[in-house]
Image: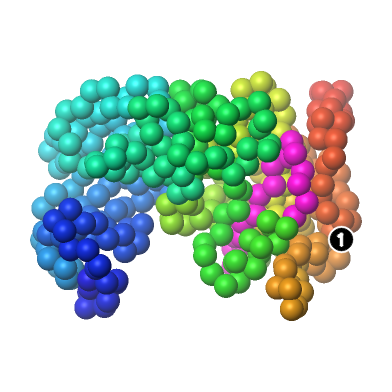
Amino acid sequence: MAVNDKDAGALLDTKDNYSAYVSPYFVGHNNRYTKHYYAGAMRIASKMGASGSTYAAGTDEPDLYFYHTDHLGSTTYITDRKEVAQYVAYTPYGETFKEYKNVTPYKFNGKELDQETGYYYYGARYYDPSTALWFGVDPLQHKYPEVSPYVYCAGNPVKYVDPDGREKLIFFAPSESNNRISNAANNYPENDGVIHIWAHGVSNENDKNIGLQYYGNSGISATLNNSVQFEQTILQQSNTYQQNEDNNKTSIIVLHSCKTGQKDGFAENISKDINAIVVAPSDNVNVETTFPSGKSVEKGVENGGSWNIYYKGKSVNSFDGNTKPIFRNPDNIINKYVKTEEETK
């Protein structure tokens, strides 16, 4: 298979119903292809064109479809250039309840429905909407012993989504340097009740932090630079945040993202609008790899920096950047800062 005269992969099976996933933006089929367009990490449109095993720029693409989703990211209406081209209604757990036409397989939670099996693929596991069960055990089952490792969204699919079948708050694109940081994140001590996030901090031309870089399981990269974008992402990715929101409980979020703890930086700004205590570094986060083991470890904040703590848009504390931001008694920390904020009102 070739895209713009460059090899994009070899086809080992040339049956009439094959699909070749070249990238999140491009999927080739035996006599057609689909190009996807995204706003941040959300698919908003797809173009379809007819072709053989070679796809070149300038090919006629008569079919353009726009996705209209609900609060769970599920496709409800799809429109073309003129009218409604597809409508789908779902049962709470994702079975197709009613459907008008069928022009695209991207349906429940925006995931692709496999026509042969009837399963949705989420990245870490397959999901069967007819039984509301995962094929495979939740990799983080030890964190939620009260919930079956096969059940979808803790039995509350109307409010929650599980974008890849697990809770992993490591937002890096695959690369040699990023894999080293991801390795350090995986080696980081467990800290139940606290949400730790690894992502690249984003700075402007004046070296001022303005957000963080999110790389989702769909393979799409986006810059999160406000509290709305951030909270939408965390609600989809973190079971802890979902449960805290459900119980009106304050969360603790630690951003292992360079310079996000700067004054007027991303951590301070999002803390104004979300119900969370946000901890972030004032400078770059240092990761070291030991040899010959190849194990990577997070060593702290560079240049004598600190971990800064923000709540309700205020700097409430800071501590040594060489100290790991591990909170063994998160409820005590939450009570301390929430109570202090209430007393100063």
Q: Quadrant of residue 245?
A: top right
Whole-percent x, y for residue 91 in the image: 35, 22
**Residue 139 vertical placement versus 23 (above, below):** above
| Relative depth, front residue between 16 and 297 | 16
Name the residue rendered at 22%, 71% in the picture: 1
**Residue 112 vertical placement versus 323 (above, below):** above
State which region is magenta. Answer: 188-205
- Which kind of residue does numbered mark 1 sit on? Asn
Name the residue rendered at 63%, 61% in the picture: 182
Does residue 322 appear left or right of residue 284 in this picture? right
Circle 1 — which element? loop
Magenta span contains residue 177: no
Name the residue rendered at 56%, 49% in the picture: 225
Name the residue rendered at 27%, 76% in the picture: 7
Residue 223 visible somewhere in the drawing = no
Does residue 258 appear left or right of residue 80 in this picture? right
**Residue 200 vertical placement versus 197 (above, below):** below
Q: Quadrant of residue 284?
A: bottom right
Q: What residue would you read off at disc 1?
A: 322
